[in-house]
Image (cartoon, rainbow, N blue to C red):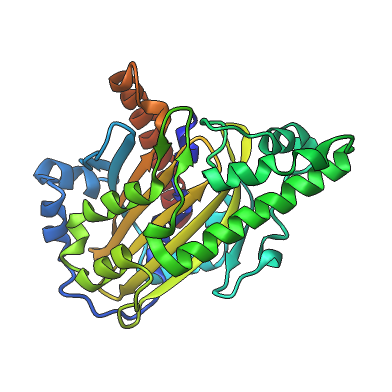
């Protein structure tokens, strides 16, 4: 399992866009450090430029969770300029393509998503998908694919590729519009060989357990849990689809973000509410606070994957967390080096 694919790495600094938001009471850097149980020795490490881990509870046998803190030697405005210049995108080597999604999206919104001729094997596997972990599909989606089998007989590769891309785009549009209408309750479960996986339930559990920041942004937390709901004043949101290489395979990802920040700090909430394969869902909370001559960044990721459940779960979790942490550290170090 390539844990690099389990994280929403671009999200780490998007919370720093220059928005005005009214929060209950944004914590001081000292209070935030205390909230994450980072002691005096950890603070010393941070001030020496090191990355420090903090505990993020895992809510199930399927979850991997990691939290990191770092002081980036740049102001909020410098980091905003860094983002606006597209430097984060350059570092996303696993990203094939991505597009924002508007409220009134239609099938044309996904026209840039699709399998290529070089990915014909993947396209054929998708059209013949069965319950299991090879693809994350609902019963309705699997039934829809089965209904196409007659059209596939005697079809050449061009026809097969067209059908696969058309059907995947339809699935993505349906999942997106249903989520916009019903939120977490509208996310269809993935059908496995035995039973099912419910990403909506996983994401709700993750949101409920992100308590460290919820006390400072209670309205935002409630909106996040009860979406669709009115956004708190001066809070923004965005949706996008991504096509990324996950375990050497292209996959579709649907993402929802809410962002709030001002001159004294900020927060990003991000969830991947559909992932095509390899993992079930991902939930990110990132926060930033001005600290001396830089910015104190807190960054946590919870990713759910069936791959770490079952026999050997403890060992799978250990290696999964290790890989996830390494990728997160590499990302923070790259950003830090760029901004020095």
Locate residue 205, reporting x and y percent: 27, 49
Horizontal side of residue 31 vs 324, given as left or right: left
Residue at x-position 29% and y-position 31%: 61
Residue at x-position 34% and y-position 16%: 311
**Picture quarter containing residue 286?**
bottom left
Residue 150 lies, with reference to residue 263, above or below; the image says: above
Nearest the viewer among 98 and 226 is 226
Residue at x-position 30% and y-position 70%: 223
**Picture quarter containing residue 317?**
top left
Nearest the viewer among 11 and 40 is 11
Horizontal side of residue 86 vs 232, given as left or right: right
Locate residue 251, reporting x and y percent: 60, 43
Nearest the viewer among 321 and 45 is 321
Locate residue 40, reporting x and y percent: 10, 45
Residue 22 lies, with reference to residue 68, above or below; the image says: below
Residue 208 lies, with reference to residue 79, above or below; the image says: above
Nearest the viewer among 113 and 14 is 113
Locate residue 25, reporting x and y percent: 15, 73
* Residue 340 visible (yes or no): no
Residue at x-position 45% and y-position 69%: 181
**Picture quarter containing residue 281?**
top left
């Amino acid at each position: 399992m390539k844990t690099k694919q389990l994280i929403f790495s671009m999200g780490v600094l998007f919370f720093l866009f220059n928005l005005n938001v009214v929060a209950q009471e944004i914590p001081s850097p000292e209070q935030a450090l205390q909230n994450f149980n980072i002691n005096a020795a950890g603070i010393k490490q941070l001030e020496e430029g090191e990355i420090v881990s903090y505990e993020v509870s895992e809510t199930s046998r399927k979850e991997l969770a990691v939290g990191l803190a770092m002081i980036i030697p740049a102001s909020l405005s410098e980091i905003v300029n860094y983002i606006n210049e597209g430097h984060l995108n350059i570092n996303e080597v696993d990203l094939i393509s991505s597009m924002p999604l508007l409220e009134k999206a239609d099938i044309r919104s996904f026209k840039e998503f699709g399998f290529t001729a070089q990915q014909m094997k993947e396209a054929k596997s998708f059209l013949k998908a069965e319950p299991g972990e090879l693809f994350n599909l609902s019963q309705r989606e699997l039934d829809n694919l089965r209904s196409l089998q007659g059209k596939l007989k005697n079809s050449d590769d061009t026809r097969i590729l067209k059908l696969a891309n058309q059907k995947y785009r339809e699935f993505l549009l349906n999942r997106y519009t249903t989520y916009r209408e019903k939120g977490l309750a509208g996310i269809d479960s993935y059908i496995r060989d035995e039973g099912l996986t419910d990403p909506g339930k996983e994401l709700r559990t993750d949101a409920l357990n992100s308590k460290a920041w919820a006390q400072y942004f209670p309205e935002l937390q409630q909106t996040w849990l009860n979406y669709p709901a009115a956004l708190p004043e001066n809070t923004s949101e965005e949706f996008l689809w991504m096509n990324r290489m996950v375990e050497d395979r292209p996959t579709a990802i649907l993402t929802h973000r809410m962002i709030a920040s001002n001159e004294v700090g900020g927060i990003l909430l991000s969830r991947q509410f559909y992932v095509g394969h390899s993992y079930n869902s991902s939930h990110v909370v990132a926060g930033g606070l001005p600290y001396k001559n830089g910015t104190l960044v807190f960054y946590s990721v919870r990713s759910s994957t069936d791959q770490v459940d079952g026999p050997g779960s403890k060992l799978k979790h250990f290696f999964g967390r290790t890989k996830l942490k390494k990728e997160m550290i590499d990302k923070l170090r790259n950003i830090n080096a760029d901004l020095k």
